[in-house]
Structures are given as structure tokens and as C-alpha cells.
Amino acid sequence: MLKVVTAKEMQKIDRDTINKYGIPGTVLMERAGLAVVKKINEIYPKKKIIVLCGGGNNGGDGLVAARILHNQGRDVKVFLTSKPGDLRGDTRINYNAAKKFGVKVHSLKNFFASLSRITHHCLIVDALLGTGLSSEVRPPVSKLIAKINKAKCSKISIDIPSGISSDTGQLMGSAVRAQHTVSFGLPKRGHLLYPGAGNAGELHMEDIGFPRELLESEKIKVSLTDKRDIFQLMPERPRYSHKGTYGHVLLIAGSKGKTGAAFLASKACLRTGAGLVTIGVPESLAGIFQSRVTEEMILPLPDKGNGTVALKAADLILAFLRQKANVLAIGPGISTDSEISRVVSRLIINSNVPIVIDADAINAITGRYYSFQARTRLLKKAGSSVILTPHPGEMARLLLGSGTGGRGSARELLAKLEKDRVNTAVSFAGKTKTHLVLKGVPTIVAVPDGKAFINSTGNPGMATAGTGDVLTGMISALLAQGLTPQNASVAGVHMHGLTADISAKKKGERSLTASDIINAMSSVFKSIRP
């Protein structure tokens, strides 16, 4: 899988390439400038070019690009935020080279004076700040960024839009909104996490000669999934097999008024290849469920009399797991009744098979265990592997009392976790020894050993009722077919988004439903090829 780096990790790759492999920094800067020029000529072959350069290496890349474009006969002007005498190292070398080639280099003051002449015939190349930004952008650069964003012309950023945190994707006060970003070596987290991903526009990754050994280092813990990776994870379907070969999922789902969640999860489970699916439901609703299912089986469970599962159902569920099922999924539509939390706790501690915990089952944990320490102790006592699939609101409730980003309410924690989705997910998975699927844009899968996976599929049409239930069914089915919790989570999330993308092409994002995703699953399996 393609690695995704922080600013510090990318800086180390850069240093090691220079110091250990003997590739001079000027060579890397030259290659970066050439890569930018290639994209500019492909995308904007006729526009006048304005290159805005800072005083660091990002500005050096911009100066290389300006020199090469000028030498090719393109109309190029450079505006420099630093005084020429303050430039150092490779950036200074390339400033001098650009001047000798005849590139016109102006001060920032001249840029502000020429704003009225910037039209749609121009292209602004953002080479201001790069990946090393660690504090908020201040004047005059913040003022410059505001003017760039208002300019009625195209923008392309070098490495990352100036003002975006490479590590979190957050806006550092103000940030360039580019149509395209040309980056080098490996994508940065800020390219893929919002709002940075939105500011980056279309991302173009270019090879400028970093050693493969550095780019594939196991010390880099975050990866980006793609379709080729998922194909490698898919379980085989041997000719000599039967339904038992592909596992049996027991799905505890549904309650009075919430039967739809169970049907969505179970259908998705079957469509993803599980051999057998049994839905455990409150016995008072068994007739309703029995009349609607075709391929699934029904396990009536002791009922409190209000259409929800009673505490004594836990023993029946555990007995079923010992005898028949190899995966337990619990949560979709089971309600937040008081006894549900006790059922969920018993199942976590005593289950002999992997568990996927979603929706109301997550709420049951947070409702009964008021401290983060108590929730952690429960999850660490699990009898088997646990996969949690919270949306951001549920995740914030799981984090209450954890000290993540300081103390505060679930609403305050929600805002904080959305500012650093990767590290929040990695920290939680490590502390609780669980596999975490933090749903959202993008969805993050974090595992106990510190690895995390950023999902690359999905669209806004998925923001509709039932899509989370579908994901629960898909992950459970992959577990049942023998995938590890990590691989089932990564593959399930990627396929879930990919299916929605395929469905949205036919239905449109606005009218997409959870059932549409289930109905499009066969297209996903067909689309996954080496």
C-alpha cells in the first residue's frame, strides 16, 4: 500500500536521500521543478504564469520551475516574499540561476500593485510555504493568500497548498485554494484529510528519485488504500467448497421501530460473500422478520416485552456462537434500552469469535461505562478480537474522559477529533487493543499495533440512513470468510465506498440510498482486478 507521511517523516526521507544515498539537494530540487513544469505544460499550456515564492525549499522548487518555463519561452514572472539576501542553500543557488537565465523576479509589493492585471488568462503557482508549516500564517503572507484566493485565475500549488497543515489537513489561519497540487515522493496526510484535501484540488504525485527503500519503510505507519490492495485481500472462492466454507455470521440487530437496520446489514453480509447469516431478534418481532427474509435465518431472543432484547438473551447468543457461528455482529437498530448495555458487555467479555460492534451497541458501552478507563478495561477484557465502527459523534462519546485534546463535552471532543482524525484513531486503538473504523470523510481504520489506513473511496451520497448498517454487514462477511480483523476492516471500508461510487454514477449522489449500495455490490466484485 502507498505510504502517507507527516512533514517530519518526509523531511527525514529528504535528508536520508541526500546524506545516505548521496543525491544532492539541488538535484532533488531540480527534479521537483521539472515535475511541476511537466504538469503546468499538460494542464495550462497557454496561460501567463505568476510564480509566488517563499524563502524556503518550496520557494526553491518554484524558482526552478520559473527558470525552466522561462527557458521554454513561457511568459513567467516571479514574486518573492523574502529579500534575496536572506535566501540560503539550494534556494539561493536557484535564485541566482533564475536571474542569470533572465527570469524577472519582483518583490511582494509589486505583486499587490499588479493584482488588477491578473485575469483568467493567468496561472498562479503557489510556492510559498510548503510542508514545513507549523504555526498560523501571518501577514504579509496571510494577506497574500487572501488575494490569491480572490484572483479570478487558475492556481496550482507545489507540494501542498500554502497554509495547510501537512499532518492534519487543517487550515493554519488561511490557506491557498488550488485546482491542482503537484507533490513529490509520498502523499502527506494533509493532502487526504479535510479541509486540506478540498484545498489541494486534484493531487498529482511525482517521482523525483527518492529511494524506494525509504518510501516503503515499515516505520511509516499510515497507508492509503487502493483497488489493487483490496484485490490482494479478497478471500478465494475455490471450486470445491460449500456455504460452510464461507462462514456463518450471527447478527444481533433490530428492535421495535428499527427493523430496517437488521435487513440492510444482513443483505450486505450475504452480498459480500458470507455463506450463512442468522439474525438474532427480539422474539416478539420474530414473525415480522420471518415474513421478510429469504436467504437469512432468524434466531428469536428473549424479549423485555417492549420489542427489545432482554439480558437473558446473552446466554442463548453465546451458546449459538459456540455451536454454529464464527462471527458476531451487534448493534444496528438494537435500541438504547437499559438491558442492552449489559448484554453487550457480557458478549464482549465472553464471545469466542470476533465481534463487530456498531451503532446502538457502541452507545450501550458509553451509556453504561461512564469513564474512559472503565470502557478501556471492558474492551481489553474481550474474549476475542473487537472491531468498533463509530461515526464521529459515537467516537466522541467513546473518548469522554480520555484526556484526548483536554477535557470537555462530547461536542467539544467531536470538534477536536475532527481536527486530527488519524492520531485520535491510532491512540484509541492502541489504548483499547481494538480495531477501530472511524467513519467519516475520510474513514480511518486504526489497529492496535499503531498502523492506520486512510480510505480513498466514497462520496457525499453516503450521508444517508442505513449506510453504516451496510458497512457492518460487509466487514462481518469478510471476517467470516477468514480475513483478519485488520484486513476485513480495510477491505470492507474500501469496498463500501467503492460500491457507493459505482452506484452514484448511475443514481446520482443526491438520491443514493443504502439499498442502492447493496444492489451495486456485484459490480464492485467485478471491478476488482489485479
Image (cartoon, rainbow, N blue to C red):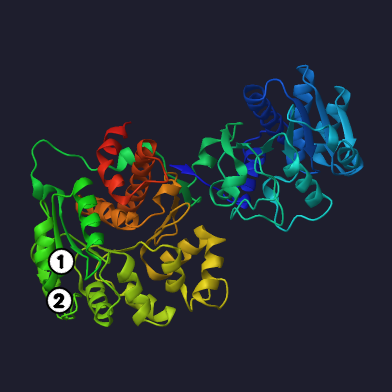
Query: Which corner quadrant of the image does residue 509 belong to?
Result: top left
Q: Which SS class for mark 1? A: strand
Viewer-closest of 496 and 19: 496
The answer to whether residue 8 is left or right of residue 107 is left
- Sequence order check, earlier mark of 2 and 1: 1
Query: Which corner quadrant of the image does residue 56 belong to?
Result: top right
Q: Which SS class for mark 2? A: helix
Question: Mark 1 and mark 2 in contact (Cβ < 8 Å)?
Answer: yes
The residues tagged by marks 2 and 1 sit, at their Cα atoms, a distance apart of 9 Å
Residue at mark 1? 280
Viewer-closest of 362 and 324: 362
Q: Which label sits on residue 200? A: none
The residue at 78%/32% (across/down) is 50
Q: Which label sits on residue 313? A: 2
Q: Which amino acid does label 1 sit on?
A: Gly
Q: Is residue 259 above or below residue 268?
A: below
The answer to whether residue 65 is left or right of residue 261 is right
Residue 29: % across, % down? 71, 33
The residue at 50%/64% (across/down) is 424
Numbered disc total: 2
Q: In this view, does 421 lie above or below 335?
A: above
Quadrant position of the N terminus in the picture:
top left
Viewer-closest of 313 and 424: 313
Categorize mark 2 by other alpha carbons within 10 Å: few (<14), some (14-19), many (20+).
Answer: some
Q: Which amino acid does label 2 sit on?
A: Ala
Q: In this view, does 212 lie above or below 268?
A: above
Categorize mark 1 by other alpha carbons within 10 Å: few (<14), some (14-19), many (20+).
Answer: many
Residue 358: % across, % down? 32, 64
Quadrant position of the C terminus in the picture:
top left
